[in-house]
Image (cartoon, rainbow, N blue to C red):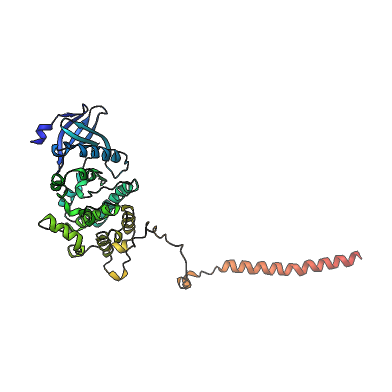
Amino acid sequence: MVDDAFQDLILGARYRLIHQVGKGGMAYVFKAYDQMLERPVAVKLLKQDFSGDQDFRERFKQEAKSAANLSHPNIVTVHDFGIDSFGVYIVMEYIAGTDLKSRIREVERFPLVDGIELMVQACAGLGYAHRAGIVHCDVKPQNMLVTPDQRLKITDFGIARALSTLETETVQDMVWGSPQYFAPEQALGELPTPSTDVYSLGVVMYELFTGRLPFEAGSVEELIKMHQEQPPQDPRIYRPDLPEELALIMLKVLSKEPSARYRTADQLGHILANLLLKPRAMNETSANEINVPAPEDQIASPPTMPSPTHVTHEDYTPSSRIVDWKLIWLELITLLLVGGLIPFWLFIWFKLSTTIR
């Protein structure tokens, strides 16, 4: 057992491995203890097949440094990187929780609000990386960790890019271990862009809300062809209660052409967050009344503030016109008094003037 073989192993004379918490196509993940800073950490130890390649090690080191510069609440923090006799390893913050893929298996189809909130967080983390000039290249639910308080954190930035230095035969089994999330241009070997991550995030959204992937095939080649040529099924086929605006957003994100998608994760995140502010759209089923934001809208419009209350003529009713008769009588008496006193004082002034003369 790998767990037994590495248990209590100390990497870099600092990180003591406690137990294995995960395993992927290229690495083992352990909960470990940082003996210098006295805190729990997560350690990803690459398999020997990858650790032995010098070019890969150098590229991985560069990517690890770039990832370590990312500081965001929705990104797993990279603490350290090292090369040991046991291989190449990367040290990250330890997240008490589970990956999103496991959560999808448990829930099958996420509640709308919960799912959108998680995707908004994913967009926030990816958007921050995009603004820093970093493209993830391997966005999938296995690389999204969810804490008990529903905080989502993205991990494994840069690893996919480091793999590009390996020979095709070596990396093929690993890279295509999860081709379901690859963008069409990524499968062709084109340079990834933020829009590439957006497409992969769209696949995650599709799976999150329907419980299934947009494309499934018996071979990698067939799956690649589907990503490149076949339009995805409307997600409402698998989940009829899905709001139409959300369904159209998902289909837009899964466009074959990068220019037809939302260009960045930030843009998609703003649109999804704005959707949460529109309860009507969350329950809407009529396509005629749906307005999907265009891709050129970099920032979603802020929520419309309610206008000041305006009372129209129709708002008034006879019962609202209350007549204060006391006030009316008081005003009349005042007018009479004032009106009567003026002639009186004029008469007095006239008499006094006559007497003086």
Q: Is residue 173 above or below residue 38?
A: below
Question: Can residue 89 be seen here?
Answer: yes
Q: Position of residue 115 (x, y in %)?
A: 24, 54
In the rendered structure, the answer to whether residue 293 lies left or right of residue 202 reads right
Query: If the image is split into quadrants, where does the N terminus sit?
Result: top left
User: Which residue is found at the position 31% from the left and 53% from the top?
Assistant: 265
The mark total stands at: 0
Q: Nearer the viewer, residue 208 or 128?
A: 128
Q: Quadrant of residue 292?
A: bottom left
Q: Nearer the viewer, residue 310 or 326?
A: 310
Q: Residue furthest left?
A: 1
Q: Position of residue 270 (x, y in %)?
A: 34, 55
Q: Quadrant of residue 93?
A: top left
Question: Can residue 216 be seen here?
Answer: no
Q: Is residue 352 above or below residue 121?
A: below
Q: Nearer the viewer, residue 303 or 27?
A: 27
User: Which residue is found at the position 28% from the left and 41% from the top?
Assistant: 67
Q: Position of residue 219 (x, y in %)?
A: 10, 56
In the rendered structure, the answer to whether residue 222 lies left or right of residue 313 reads left
Query: If the image is split into quadrants, where does the C terminus sit?
Result: bottom right
Q: Position of residue 147 (x, y in %)?
A: 23, 44
